[in-house]
Image (tube, rainbow, N blue to C red):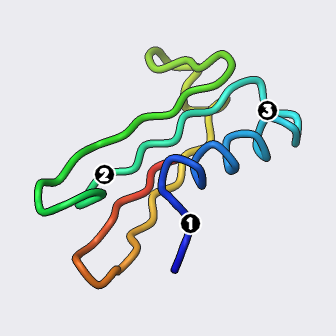
Amino acid sequence: EGLAVRRACYGVLRFIMESGAKGCEVVVSGKLRGQRAKSMKFVDGLMIHSGDPVNYYVDTAVRHVLLRQGVLGIKV
C-alpha cells in the first residue's frame, strides 16, 4: 500500500521549499478517489504565473504515473 496523495504532495512541497525555492505549486489530476477524476492543487510560497519572467524564473515538469485504476498526471 502506498502513501496518500495529499500527504505525499505536502512532503514534496516541503522538500522543494527547504531546498531553497521561493515558491512551488504541485498539481495532481486524475482518479484520486473513486471513479470520478479530480484535480488537487498545493501551493507554497510566492509563484508567478504570467508575463515574460515566467520563462526564465520558473521551472516546470510534468509526469504521468500509471496506476491500477488509471493514469495520474503530476505537474510541478
The label number, if any, that marks residue 29 in the structure image:
2
User: Looking at numbered disc 2 in the image, what kind of residue is underneath it?
Assistant: Ser
* Callout 3 secondary element: loop
* Callout 1 secondary element: loop
Tally of numbered discs: 3
Q: Please name the residue that numbered disc 3 is placed on.
A: 21
Relative vertical location of residue 73 with respect to residue 66 in this rendering, above or below: above
User: Looking at numbered disc 3 in the image, what kind of residue is underneath it?
Assistant: Ala
Earlier sequence position, callout 3 versus callout 2: 3
User: Looking at numbered disc 1 in the image, what kind of residue is underneath it?
Assistant: Leu
The label number, if any, that marks residue 68 in the structure image:
none
The residue mark sitting in front, 3 or 1, is 1
Earlier sequence position, callout 1 versus callout 2: 1
Q: CA distance from mark 1 to mark 2?
A: 16 Å
Q: CA distance from mark 3 to mark 1?
A: 24 Å
* Left or right side of 15 for 7: left
Q: Nearer the viewer, residue 34 or 30?
A: 34
Q: Residue at x 27, y 72 (%)?
A: 71
Q: Nearer the viewer, residue 18 or 62?
A: 18
**Image quarter of residue 20:** top right
The label number, if any, that marks residue 3 in the structure image:
1
Relative vertical location of residue 4 with respect to residue 53 in this rendering, above or below: below
